[in-house]
Image (cartoon, grey):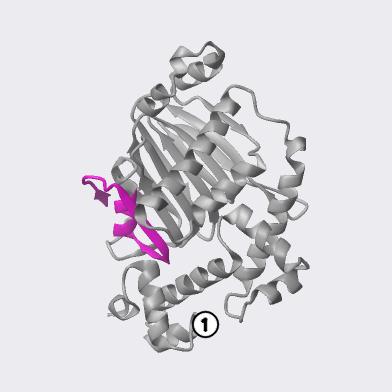
Amino acid sequence: MCHQGKPKLSVKLLGTGLRWREIANMAESAGSDFCALDPSFGPEDVVIEGRVSVSRLRSGLTIHTAETAEVNDLTMEMVLPSCLNVFVILEGGIDFKLDEIPFAFSALKENSQVQPTAFAVAITKPARLERHSRRGSRTRKVNIMIKPEWLDDCGLNDKADAEDVGCFLRKHLAQTSWEPSSRAVALAEQMLNPPRLPPIVRELYLESRAIELAAEALQALNGELRCPALDRAGTIDICRAQTVRDYIEQRLGDPLTLSIIAREVGIGTTTLQRLFKSVYGTTVVEYVRIRKLERARFAIETEGLSVSEAAYLAGYRNPANFATAFKRAFGISPKMLRN
């Protein structure tokens, strides 16, 4: 089943079972001629569980974030425009082909800790992407597509010290990978979990972080990244923040307060707040609140929970307060979503 149409400037899909029509709409915001090769889906079929967001920003940057679990074995195809594609993979991996050339990248596990990876691919002309995903696989990633005009505005062609970058960008399907800095990992986490902001402020928030990630990618292309050993302190902080996040995700159905979380993970409340905010760009309390709302939304859509039942699931005693918070988060009331 193919989907064609004019791409939208921004598509945001949060905390739900994502239907085929939503996935197709999102894909058309990043490329064209989107198709499912195997198997085919109806518009309302749930294809992916999780959170996905695509934003096309004014400066020639397109940001795609995903925290997903695959429901089916799936092969999808689309055409990507000319761009520099930068990825930060926080967990899991991706397997795809560009013009029949295979690519595979994944985060690594060392001593039970996940080590994120980053890579970049230069696309100098429209390229056909074939993406493979396996049922049950989980991925957390950030992808930035940088248009040639954005790179031209940086003046790369005029800088003698950027010769390596220029050569890379002129070679179709050139690729490189590197170990992202702790700052890059924190930026990616913040883009996956942006705070509640007005739309224009949210776009500036995402753009500022995308530009920092683009700068690190260009440094990597030019061989100027710092030694990972010099970044060790930041990496330790990220691991501790990930431990906190994992604890929250495993206990979303329980009452979760700052003091309970701090006690269970063995970190003081002040340190806990500082670590979590520096890595994920949001407070512990706000993260718990939005994840519980997303959990309730998914239950409404997949299990048909009543508004009162969903409110209880999200930790709200008053269904009216839950409805207000829900509409503020997702732009639709729980009653309308259920209907």
Bounds of the magenta segment: 1-26
Residue 5 appears at what percent x and percent y?
21, 46
Is residue 174 part of the magenta span, yes or no? no
- Give the amino acid type for the residue marked by disc 1 in the picture: Gly
Residue 241 appears at what percent x and percent y?
68, 58
- Front-most of 87 and 129? 87
* Mark 1 element type: loop
Q: Residue at x 52, y 40 (%)?
A: 87
- Front-most of 273 and 188? 273
Q: Is residue 32 visible?
A: yes
Residue 20 appears at what percent x and percent y?
32, 59
Q: Residue at x 47, y 53 (%)?
A: 66
Residue 181 appears at what percent x and percent y?
65, 39
In this view, 312 is above or below 32: below
Residue 324, picture quadrant: bottom left
Report the residue marked by disc 1: 315
